[in-house]
């Protein structure tokens, strides 16, 4: 079974080192000007986390003394009112945990800053309830006095952070922030964190490597600035990111050959090995999707091996159904309710149902419903053309319920 956890660069089955080595050159070069922010763009499951982990591992192994590596996952803090405080806490916790205690002064200064910011957030949430007018007056005065201190601290925050980064630079060290899972947060939180990064981490001697799903950020920007009613022709998301990211890195889509190599080299099991040709053409070129398909195939293989009466099932149909189950669960649910839909979609993609009378001759009273569903899903999923081009579900029509039940549905 394949975990969805990021893999080590030593087990790089998808050639992520083609990104890692150039990024390492950029981060470690004395000629790279800072502040410098790298945006790693890709869809969910495309390997952004794996790439960040690989860069982090290489820095740890080859340049441990030269970089303070800070990891921040905003999704873990998604219930926080804002992202600045947990972001600074991540830096504070990293330098506090240094086994050689090299950052004592920095720990103290960051501790004061984060403590004051935390106090501010607590005051904002203060529930006065039914307290007296006199009590309210005292609280208001205390709040105003502390607010002045907090405003002062916040105003000097960037200056204090720059001072600490410069101090590290004198010791030939720089800071690298790795920010991941941002696109799992809400739209407002996404923009809050991006703005905090721009305001407070855009500093000399500081790198930021941030994983982004461009579509999700675009939606966040649209929600935040909806009141401005920008015309559709204005690409506000692009402009927004251009102002904060100096190097956009777009993960290349995987091709069939790369998908096939990943399947072969991942120890996929007998069932997947037998049908690599089908899988490399039909599985979505996304690491997360590939792993889910391979895991379900391994489980299905084990079920077949333990159930003698399933030994005669056609394994190519099993492989196709597993792909369908993982990549189009809504279509698979329809097929589970109406197995004849498999036959209909197969005939459509094999160009054997061209005219309305063909449908009625084949399916009688079910023809209109099957045609409607076929039109919907054929338009929705491009991979169906390859999945059904050479399938033979019609020949196993009497056993389809066994296939579907075994895989789930």
Image (cartoon, rainbow, N blue to C red):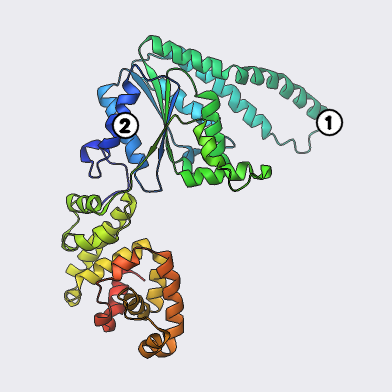
**Looking at the rendering, which quadrant does residue 275 occupy?**
bottom left
Q: CA distance from mark 2 to mark 1?
A: 57 Å
Q: Is residue 281 above or below residue 226?
A: below
Residue 133 has which mark? 1
Vertical comparison of 398 with 105: above or below: below
Q: Secondary structure at mark 2?
A: helix
Q: Secondary structure at mark 1?
A: helix
Relative side of 104 to 15, left or right: right
Task: Give percent across and percent down for residue 303.
Answer: 22, 67
Q: Quadrant of residue 277?
A: bottom left
Instruction: Establish if 1 lies above or below 97.
Output: below
Vertical side of 138 occupied by 3: above or below: below
Q: Residue 242 location, x and y as percent?
A: 50, 33
Name, please, the residue furthest toward the right.
133
On screen, residue 147 versus residue 233, left or right, reads right
Locate residue 301, reporting x and y percent: 21, 65
The crowd level at tag 1 (other Cα within 10 Å; few <14, some 14-19, many 20+) is: few
First in sequence: mark 2 or mark 1? 2
Camera sees residue 370: yes
In this orientation, does residue 79 appear? no
In front: label 2 or label 1: 2
Q: Position of residue 119 (x, y in %)?
A: 62, 26
Which residue is at 23% across, 63% downward? Answer: 278
Q: Is residue 403 left or right of residue 111?
A: left
Are there few (<14), some (14-19), or many (20+) residues within 10 Å of tag 2?
many
216 or 8, nearer to the observer: 216
Which residue is painted at 59% across and 48% down in the image?
A: 232
Per the rendering, the mark at residue 190 is none
Which of 255/78 is in front? Answer: 255
Question: Mark 2 = which residue?
Answer: 55
- What is the count of numbered marks? 2
């Amino acid at each position: 079974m394949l975990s969805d956890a990021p893999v080590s660069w030593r087990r790089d089955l998808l050639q992520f080192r083609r990104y890692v080595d150039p990024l390492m050159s950029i981060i470690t070069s004395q000629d790279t000007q800072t502040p410098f922010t790298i945006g790693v763009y890709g869809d969910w499951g495309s390997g952004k986390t794996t790439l960040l982990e690989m860069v982090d591992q290489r820095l740890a192994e080859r340049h441990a003394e030269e970089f303070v590596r800070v990891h921040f996952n905003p999704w873990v803090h998604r219930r926080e009112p804002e992202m600045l405080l947990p972001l600074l806490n991540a830096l504070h916790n990293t330098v506090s945990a240094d086994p050689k205690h090299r950052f004592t002064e920095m720990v103290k200064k960051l501790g004061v800053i984060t403590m004051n910011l935390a106090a501010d957030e607590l005051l904002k949430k203060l529930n006065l309830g039914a307290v007296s007018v006199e009590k309210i007056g005292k609280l208001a005065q205390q709040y105003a006095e502390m607010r002045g201190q907090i405003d002062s601290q916040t105003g000097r925050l960037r200056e204090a952070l720059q001072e600490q980064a410069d101090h590290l630079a004198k010791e030939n060290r720089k800071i690298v922030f790795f920010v991941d899972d941002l696109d799992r947060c809400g739209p407002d939180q996404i923009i809050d964190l991006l703005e905090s990064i721009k305001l407070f981490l855009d500093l000399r001697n500081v790198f930021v490597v941030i994983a982004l799903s461009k579509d999700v950020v675009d939606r966040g920007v649209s929600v935040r600035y909806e009141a401005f009613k920008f015309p559709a022709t204005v690409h506000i998301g692009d402009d927004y990111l251009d102002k904060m990211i100096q190097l956009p890195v777009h993960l290349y889509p995987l091709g069939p050959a790369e998908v096939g190599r990943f399947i072969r080299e991942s120890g996929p099991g007998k069932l997947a090995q037998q049908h690599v040709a089908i899988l490399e053409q039909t599985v979505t070129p996304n690491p997360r999707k590939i792993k889910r398909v391979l895991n379900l195939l391994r489980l299905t293989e084990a079920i077949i091996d333990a159930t003698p009466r399933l030994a005669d099932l056609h394994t190519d149909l099993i492989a196709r159904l597993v792909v369908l189950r993982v990549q189009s669960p809504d279509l698979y649910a329809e097929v589970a309710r109406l197995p004849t839909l498999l036959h209909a979609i197969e005939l459509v993609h094999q160009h054997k149902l061209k005219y309305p009378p063909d449908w009625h001759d084949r399916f009688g009273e079910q023809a209109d419903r099957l045609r409607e569903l076929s039109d919907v899903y054929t338009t929705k999923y491009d991979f169906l053309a390859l999945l059904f081009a050479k399938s033979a579900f019609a020949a196993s029509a009497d056993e389809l319920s066994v296939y579907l039940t075994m895989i789930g549905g």
